[in-house]
Amino acid sequence: MTDQERALKAIEALKKEYPDSICSLTYTDPLQLLISTRLAAQCTDARVNMVTPTLFAHFPDVYAFAQANVEDVERDIHSCGLYKTKARDIVAMCRMIRDEFGGKVPDSLEQLTKLPGIGRKTANLIMGDIFKKPAVVVDTHCIRLTSRLGFHQSKDPYKIEMLLKKILPEEESNDFCHRLVLHGRAVCDARKPKCEICCMKSFCKYYDDNQKKEK
């Protein structure tokens, strides 16, 4: 089975298992998703969703964030972890969006990754969810699941992104990555995956290898 064939099987299996491939972060506009994704680093989406209503009430738009005192942002996001760095990045990115991009979140990967604290993972999420452009979001779930499926043995997010861009249909890539997150949380756990109930076990290299070991 080629990587492309395996990828198509994975896409179809996950579509059936998770018809709704939505981001688990709560937001109403591009800036809110950008900030929420920055807050989600080493923090659960559930915790971020608890914090952001107060944060966005205090700072309703890019101009409010750009004029904010970092200490005030820190207080609102304290429970997210790494709050000092995150607060500094949020204020700095909003100032750049205000000063260099006319107050609007930019719509290219190159421009997004110029923003303080924004790497390719977050930039790809914005590209796919907000601007509906082909995107591959390589998070810990994506790295783990695509490795277990047999696509690679790498830990390098950039290399994995480039590989997946080659084998995934462009129109499926963003939703596929969202579904990997859902499946990683529900079934393909990092420590003890529930292989017996996995919708992809018939073509998963990790499952196949384990079956051979047991024999």
Image (tube, grey):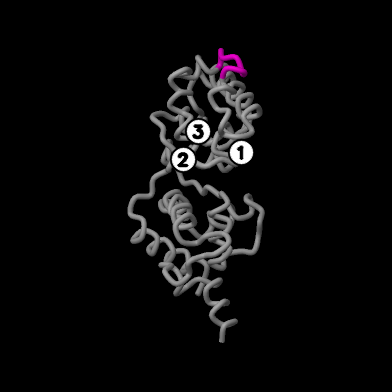
Left or right for 156, reference 207: right
Residue at figure coordinates x 36%, y 56% from the top left: 18
User: Looking at the image, do the residues carrying marks 2 and 3 touch, with CB atoms under 8 Å apart?
Assistant: no
Coordinates of residue 122 in the picture (x, y in percent): 55, 39
| Tag of residue 46 | 2
Residue at figure coordinates x 61%, y 38% from the top left: 119
Judged by depth in the image, the label closer to the viewer, 2 or 3, is 2
Q: Nearer the viewer, residue 108 or 113?
A: 113
Coordinates of residue 187 in the picture (x, y in percent): 46, 61
> Cα distance, mark 3 to mark 1?
14 Å
Q: Is residue 67 magenta?
A: yes
Around disc 3, counting alpha carbons within 10 Å, would you say few (fewer than 14), some (14 to 19), or many (20 or more)? many
Asked whether residue 169 appears in the rendered view, the answer is: no
Asked whether residue 85 appears in the rendered view, the answer is: yes
Around disc 2, counting alpha carbons within 10 Å, would you say few (fewer than 14), some (14 to 19), or many (20 or more)? few
Q: Is residue 75 magenta?
A: no
Q: Secondary structure at mark 1?
A: loop
In the displayed structure, 153 sits above or below 66; it is below
| Tag of residue 197 | none
Judged by depth in the image, the label closer to the viewer, 3 or 1, is 3
Judged by depth in the image, the label closer to the viewer, 2 or 1, is 2
Q: Nearer the viewer, residue 214 or 183?
A: 214
Residue type indicated by callout 3:
Ser
The span shown in magenta is 66-72
Q: Secondary structure at mark 3?
A: helix
Residue type indicated by callout 1:
Gly
From the image, tell me which residue sits under label 1.
119
Q: Who comes first in sequence, dot 2 or dot 1?
A: 2
Coordinates of residue 81 in the picture (x, y in percent): 61, 34
How many numbered badges does the structure rendering display?
A: 3
Say which quarter of the image contains residue 176. bottom left
Q: Who comes first in sequence, dot 2 or dot 3?
A: 3
